[in-house]
Image: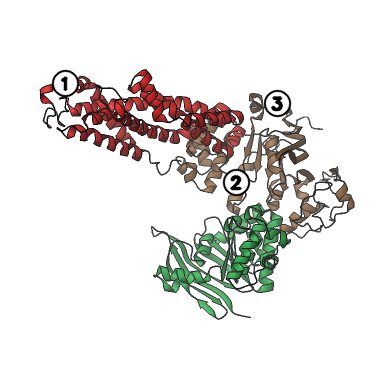
Amino acid sequence: MRAVAIVLLGLVLALGLAWGARALEVITPLASASPSLDAPLGRDHLGRDVLARLVVGAWTFVTPGALACGVSLGIGVPIGAAAGWFGGLVAAGQRALTASVESVPTLGLVCLGAAIFGPSPQVLGALAGLAWAPRVAEAVRARLESLRQAELVLALEAHGVPPWRVLIHHLLWVGCRGLLLRQALTLFAAVLTLETTLSYLGDLGVAEPTPSWGNMLSFEWGIDGNPWAAAAPALTLWITCVALAWLNEPEGRRG
Amino acid sequence: MAERTLTLEGLHLADPAGNPLLHGVSLQLTGGQLTALVGASGSGKSLTVRALLGLSGLTVTAGRLSVHDGDRITRPYDSLPNAAAVERSFATLRGAVLGWIPQDGRAALDPLREVGAQLTAVARRAGHDPNPGRWLERAGQRDAHRVSRLYPHELSGGMAQRVNVALALARGARFLLADEPTTGLDPTVQEAVLTTLRALVDNEGVAVLLVTHDLRLVPRLADTLLVMHAGEIVADGPAKALRDLTHPAAVALRDATARVSGGWL
Amino acid sequence: MSATPPRLAVSGLTVSFAAGLLGRRIVVDDVSLHLSPGEVVGLIGESGSGKTTVARAALGLIAADAGQVHLDGVAMPAPGAARRAWRRGAQLVLQDPDGMLNPGMTAAEHLIESAELHPGEGQAKARAEAMAAAMGLSARVHARPAELSGGERRRLGLGRVLLASPRLIVADEPTAGLDAHRKAELLDLLLAGRGPSGRAVLLISHDLPMVAWACDRLLVMVQGRIVEGFPARRLGQLRHHPFTAAALRAAGRPTPGHALNPEAEPSLRGCALARRCAGATARCTEEAPPLTDRGDDHLLACHHPSAP
């Protein structure tokens, strides 16, 4: 099932690349037009094709999410691995760092970043990733500690497995890949919600005219005209969040 | 002496898919006798014990169980197919008449209460002497004062099993179903626990079913030997008669045991 | 004196662990033992006697307070890559069969990893497949540990150990809880490579009849100390240590000897069994009996052993 979802997403993203210009095309006489062959979901109050914007908006969902995952895993995994492997002072340092960063509300951090650097998918993704990194580090550390307390690490050492392979292959790759995937999926959903919230708060999400599902929704809110212009992004947001949660269900056999 | 027998006849047990797990298992326990139920791993020994307690969680497709305790006779499986009635019937037997000594002694105890408190509570409910020391001594546990104040996690394996025996006695159990009670214990501790069970059989007329995979324990401790293989009882006779075993599976077990014991059997 | 160095030589090994805030508890107390190539030595003792700690310290897996370990005459180096290289050829079979299995890897992946780590004759994949067949796991190679039965997991762990073609195997309670058939199978596999210049095995167990059958020599440990050592075939014929005599009785062989109370506290001064042994005298509480040679390969540490 995960494979099907990934293929679908790939198709949508490819389409989004093709339709880039179309999503920005403003046709004023067709403002709030109802669905037609040319624009199957109609047009928004500026006359732009809703479907095209929806499809291109997938990129503004994927880009910050992927960036956030990259940043959070790239920072969180090495820190968590060091804390879990060495324990002692390193672990204590990691826990202190986690506690202090987690006490900063993510929304506030991203608002601040948007105010300083300007709202963009890249800023959103990078800051969300930074805020999430401690959670990843903590999850990795905890997993490693529990695996070390079980006799696995001692047994592998006795068997002759070199320490680098124990850490990277056994503990991180095999031991943590499941939980890291789940962290990534959760982060995608969190970034999506974050972006939507920021668009609502006043255009601090992705800036117009680049379409994002969040800003499409806030832009058309309360405007009479084509109901699909607001309903379509809302529905898409909802379906995506449900899909992410469903994909995040652990499979029966994997630990 | 009051009549005290447990008779199981022709028990057939199947899993949810209908695959038979126990075929026509029959056995009899009598007060003052220790019966050993021996078999390789997976032969169905633990399942049989759980079926005797109505805890198998599986479908009983045929079979009768009658428990005679003094004047009271209970036949739980006669209420089939009414599962609720079967359960009610077993509920009167479990603890009060049928005591269970499980493999993991500590896991069967309440981790949050001292041993003495657990014994007192159980004895009171059954209307027996609430003094825990009395029950611990009957179960062969020395230093009862100190042990009463311990929590289950502070008990050694052997002590935990004696506490389980004490709990069963405090409830008034006349049949003790011991499911591999000494696995993982050191031989000297194992010996002590098994000697306690034998003493209860000899001195108090308790009926004991000892489930084990270790045939070596049988000649010294048991009166009757049952050998189980693939869900069936394949040998049933006096414990001393190990040489007279004929069923191939029983003979194989005896020979394998003799081999890894350097011939001590 | 033999020209070949012993496969394993442990001398004066002492290991202690932190206990309480500032104290230390001695778990292994001045233990010495040696295994010749091809020899099978049994180490028996109660739980908590230090047998597992000896096994791990002898392979350099945990730090010792004192003592020396030599494998084939080579002293154990400092921890690190040098020690890992020194340890090549020696393998540990853990008491818990799940200990060396990674829950996220299949049986095949485990065996292939072992075959690649310890190169031998032929391709790693082929050797792994052959070992799977030898262990009766060919049909289950794509299963993960959670999907295998307890016995299959044990065989998988053993398969990994054997793929290393070890010259020394330290087996810590490898047959605990197994029925007679599985015990016999496992022991056959474990002892297969023995012979004059073959694999040496240190078999740790509390199953006395089994150890007596499988081993050439037996060592008895009580509270961290070796208290007796003798050739296996002379079990029951000697004036044994009270602990050995009690273990023999527990195994069903009537043996004369002082009764031991299993629940009395061990004593920290003098002989560890001073408070448990019915034959203990004042001397036993004052003075720990030294391990002395009684002749005919019989080592014994007891002031008043039982009569034969």
| Residue hosting label 1 | A26
Disc 2 versus disc 1: nearer the observer: 1
User: Is A250 above or below relative to C114?
Assistant: below
Tell me if C5 is positioned left or right of C177 in this view: right
Q: Give the quadrant of residue B5.
A: bottom right
Quick check: can you spot residue A102? yes
Disc 2 residue type (three-letter): Leu
User: Is A66 above or below relative to B230?
Assistant: above
Residues C93 and A216: in front is: A216
Spatial separation of the CA atoms under disc 3 and disc 1:
76 Å
| Residue hosting label 2 | C186
Q: Chain letter for green, please.
A: B
Disc 1 residue type (three-letter): Val
Q: Do callouts 2 and 1 point to residues on the same chain?
A: no
Q: Tell me the SS state at disc 1.
A: loop
Q: Tell me the SS state at disc 3.
A: loop
Spatial separation of the CA atoms under disc 2 and disc 1:
78 Å
Residue C39 screen position, x and y as percent: 71, 39
| Residue hosting label 3 | C77
Residue A116 screen position, x and y as percent: 38, 19
Q: Chain letter for red, please.
A: A
Q: Do callouts 3 and 1 point to residues on the same chain?
A: no
